[in-house]
Image (spheres, rainbow, N blue to C red):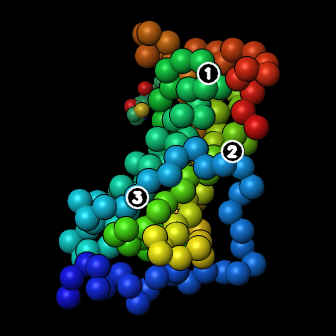
Amino acid sequence: MTIADDAKPRSGGQPDPTEKPPADAPVIRAIAMPADTNPAGDIFGGWLMAQMDLAAGSVAARRARGRCATVTVEGMTFHSPVFVGDEVSLYARLMSEGRTSMRIKIEAWRRYREEEAVNKVTEAVFVFVAIGKDRRPTPLPPADDSNRIK
Ligand SMILES: CC(C)(COP(=O)(O)OP(=O)(O)OC[C@H]1O[C@@H](n2cnc3c(N)ncnc32)[C@H](O)[C@@H]1OP(=O)(O)O)[C@@H](O)C(=O)NCCC(=O)NCCS
């Protein structure tokens, strides 16, 4: 059985019709490719976590106006699998911030490339720390209209 044949019957996953993706535009959209699979032919969880880290890192860098490092990931949950060819949308929301840290909620939603139905596949809260040239934590700059993340 090829990967494409295997993916077709499961198009759309197990969508919960009452659940809707966030209203804001996704930070990243990516297409899951054959090179991103695990030995069983489904998309590797590490690829998905990398996309989530990239999306959260983008939000963190904009808020911090500089370099940031991931310090921890809270509550990583895989709800359903992702298949080759799926379009994966990464939504991000800055939940809270401290002196140097930011908690960023990330949700990943998949869409089978030939359909409109979407379902949430993963979610987690990524904590980033703003760091300076010395790689040590540095205070976040004040938030103003230019770097306040909606
Ligand atoms: C990120 C790093 C610079 C933080 O250094 P640190 O000495 O632990 O920092 P501090 O103890 O001064 O804490 C800095 C902030 O991070 C928060 N923090 C530190 N560890 C945390 C954890 N495990 N969970 C949640 N928040 C944490 C602190 O609460 C603090 O927040 P605040 O300033 O908003 O109050 C350091 O841990 C590091 O370099 N880690 C490796 C990062 C990395 O390689 N990431 C992967 C690739 S980007």
Q: Position of residue 70 (x, y in %)?
A: 48, 35
Q: Quadrant of the C terminus?
A: top right
Crowdedness near tag 3: few (<14), some (14–19) or many (≥20) residues, C-alpha within 10 Å: some
Q: Which mark is residue 139?
A: none
**Which amino acid is tagged 1?**
Ala
101 horizontally vs 132: left or right: right
**Which amino acid is tagged 2?**
Arg
Crowdedness near tag 1: few (<14), some (14–19) or many (≥20) residues, C-alpha within 10 Å: many
Q: Which residue is painted at 54% across and 56% down in the image?
A: 89
1 horizontally vs 15: left or right: left
Q: Position of residue 10 (x, y in %)?
A: 43, 86
Crowdedness near tag 2: few (<14), some (14–19) or many (≥20) residues, C-alpha within 10 Å: many
Please name which of the two marks, 3 or 2, marks the residue nearer to the observer. Answer: 3
**Residue 57 seen in this snapshot:** yes
Above or below — where is 28 with respect to 142?
below
Q: Position of residue 60 (x, y in %)?
A: 59, 31
Label 2's element? strand
Q: Residue placed farthest to the right in the image?
A: 145
Q: Earlier in the sequence, mark 1 or mark 2?
A: 1
Please tell me which residue lies in front, 121 or 138: 121
The residue that label 1 is drawn on is 64
Q: Which residue is painted at 71% across and 57% down in the image?
A: 22
38 horizontally vs 22: left or right: left
Q: CA distance from mark 3 to mark 1?
A: 28 Å
Q: Is mark 2 within 8 Å of ligand 1?
A: no
Above or below — where is 64 with respect to 91?
above
The residue that label 2 is drawn on is 93
